[in-house]
Amino acid sequence: MDTLSHALWGGVAFGRKSRKSFLLASTFGLAPDILSFGILFASNLLGFTERVSFENGPPDPSLIPQYVDFLYNITHSLIIFFVVFGIVWFFLKKPLWEMGAWFFHIALDIFTHSFEFFPTPFLWPLFDYKFNGVSWGTPWVFFPNVALLFIFYLYFFVYKKKKT
């Protein structure tokens, strides 16, 4: 799924309590992509690495630096998510439910990434199994995603406005 959709889904699904909760959940929804591919885009913009172009669709995976693959494995692993969620819960003495947006990010990516470009390593580091999903750029995945986001946000803002 695209990064913006992850942030929007995270916010509406796990951040409805307050503005702070919404921003935190949106950030957790955004974080897995920013902490892997975002670093690549920033280093491209700053000229630290050779530019990898996404203009004509996904580039050849061999052009992506190894550190991106490693960071992608970490940020897109349900195993890592549950370990970090547990550590945060332990220190806060309560669950930080906005982190569910990170879980939801991974769950969506499992089914919206194909073997063609960065399938989701959701069981990493224990297993290398990946599911061959349907690319989020496919029209019959992309447009329903946008429509559902529109419907949920319309409901969220209309309901919230009526409530206040």
Image: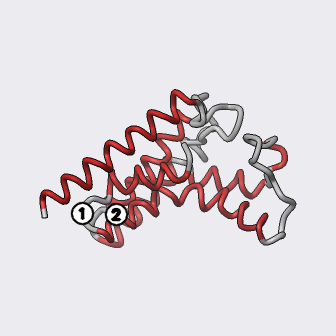
* Residue 105 image point, x, y percent: 48, 48
Residue farthest right in this picture? 50
Q: Residue at x 65, y 61 (%)?
A: 38
State yes or no: discs 2 and 1 in contact (Cβ < 8 Å).
Answer: yes
On screen, residue 36 versus residue 61, left or right, reads: left
Residue drawn at x 49%, y 34% as measured from the top left: 143
Q: Quadrant of the C terminus?
A: bottom left
Residue count near mark 1 (Cα–Cα under 10 Å), binned few <14, some 14–19, many ≥20? few
Say which amino acid is labelled 2: Phe
Give the residue at mark 2: 22
Q: Earlier in the sequence, mark 2 or mark 1?
A: 1
Q: Position of residue 93 (x, y in %)?
A: 28, 70
Color style of the picture? secondary structure
Image point (78%, 64%), residue name: 44
Helix, strand or loop at label 2? It is helix
Quadrant in the picture for residue 131: top right
Q: Which residue is mark 1?
A: 17
Q: Secondary structure at mark 1?
A: loop
* Residue type of the residue flagged with mark 1: Lys
- Residue closest to the eye, 139 or 61: 139
